[in-house]
Amino acid sequence: MLVSDFSPCCHPFLAVVAAYVEAYDAIITGSVGQYMTLSQQIGVALECSSRLLSCLSVDASLTALLAPVSKVIQQVQTFREQNRSSPLFNHLSAVSESVPALGWVAMAPKPGPYVKEMQDAAQFYTNRVLKDYKEKDQKHVDWVKAYLSIWTELQNYVKQHHTTGLAWSKSGPVASASAAPPPRAGPPPPGPPPPPMASSGGSGDQGPDTRNALFASLNKGADVTKGLKHVPKDQMTHKNPNLRTQTGPVRTGPKPFTTSKPAVTAAAASRKLPPVLELDGKKWKVENQEGVQGLVISDTELKQVVYAFKCNNSTLQIKGKINSITLDNCKKLGLVFDDVVGIIEVINCRDVKVQVLGKVPTISINKTDGCHVYLSKDSLECEIVSAKSSEMNVLVPGKDGDYTEIPVPEQFKTVWDGKKLVTTCTEIAG
């Protein structure tokens, strides 16, 4: 994995490099340097750019400064989606899931826990890398250690130098997006939005003088109503019903909130995406299927994969032996398949049912609420890996053909035994 331009840049108006910049550079030359070397050896490719920390001692527009980083994070996640068939997909997924940690600068007042959360998201995939390469190639194991150490050191760095977020100086030049180098490609990031216009009505907080005047008026007691304007009887609506039927603009304040038509139109357009069921190279694409029962993929080969995306209230059957299956953002989808030589992934789904008729070595359930897995007699030895999911049940066939439903634990208890952490399922987990 190639990481370039990761260290902060020095502005010409900073005469002395701040201590936290030097500490950040230590991370770059240490764990990041080792990570880069190992990434080049195993062939993982990724470009990142982050040039923020040297700007932290001056006032700045955070939105403009974060624009290049946000763009790179999106490119990383797009690159991962475009390489699902890569043998290093788990490596790319680990980076894709955790790279948003680079946005910790906008996560006050708890940037440290945010970095930890992103690191935990990466470990779901780094554990797969360790499982696949622990007995095969030590370089991949070292790569996992180097990559996770980046986030561990970043957590320690944030805790020491920016515990509750960034501290911006009230003096000195104003940093802007032009102070930081532009992204490698594409137009420069937009500048900050213009400051809000001052309201003549004085509805905002205008300082201690305004607040003191308000409190003084409230302390008048009964005299507080002397400044109110008297309404004549001919303008009172309860004494003049005809005023209620006026068609002219009576309201002087802002209009009540209503849902804009463009939002409804956009939502309707998203629901009308054309359904897809086609073979694109080695990938079967099943997308945007709504209420379709009896979808079948029969002409399959061992090297092919199936990717089902946003399929709702539908059923899909896959015949033959294929490499892998992925269900992504599906709701109430029923999947039946024969044999898979790799893995079945259920990601960001809800209320799905998966039934294997032949064999499958691994089933992964991630960020899913409601998943029923029906195993066959030949697939009882498969591994089921779950993370950030709920309402998972595995149905095991019995001798009489009936299924026994067994819930997957969702709650755990961890204790320190003096040497290591020991984690067990709690009794109320299922």
Image (cartoon, rainbow, N blue to C red):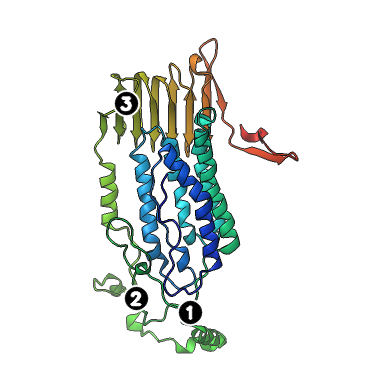
Say which quarter of the image contains residue 320.
top left
Does residue 210 appear in the picture of this structure?
Answer: yes
Query: Quick check: 273 left or right of 90?
Result: left
Secondary element under disc 2, as helix, strand or loop, is loop
Identify residue type, mark 1.
Answer: Ser
Tell me the element at label 3. loop
Q: Residues within 10 Å of mark 3 (few under 14, many from 20)?
A: some
Residue tagged 3: 293
Q: Residues at badges 1 and 2 in contact (C-beta under 8 Å)?
A: no
Q: Compare marks 3 and 1 and give the one earlier in the sequence.
A: 1
Name the residue: 51% across, 72% down: 16
Image quadrant where residue 275 sits? top left
Residue 237 tag number: 2
Q: How many marks?
A: 3
Q: CA distance from mark 3 to mark 2?
A: 60 Å
Whole-percent x, y for residue 105 in the image: 48, 61
Check contact, mark 3 vs mark 1: CB within 8 A: no
| Residue 93, image x, y percentages | 43, 40
Frontmost of labels 3 and 2 is: 3
Q: CA distance from mark 1 to mark 2?
A: 56 Å
Q: Nearer the viewer, residue 96 or 25?
A: 25
Report the residue at 57% width, 86% height from top: 219
Q: Using a 10 Å C-alpha cutoff, classify the residue at mark 2 as few (fewer than 14 neighbours), some (14 to 19) or many (20 or more).
A: few
Instruction: Name the kind of residue labelled 3 in the image.
Output: Gln
User: Which amino acid lies under the numbered mark 2 shown in the image of this protein?
Assistant: Thr
Q: Which numbered marker is on residue 171?
A: 1
Q: Earlier in the sequence, mark 1 or mark 2?
A: 1
Residue at 34 percent of width and 68 percent of height: 178
- Above or below 163: residue 286: above
Tell me the mark number nearer the camera, choosing from 3 and 1: 1
Which residue is more in the foreground, 352 or 50? 50
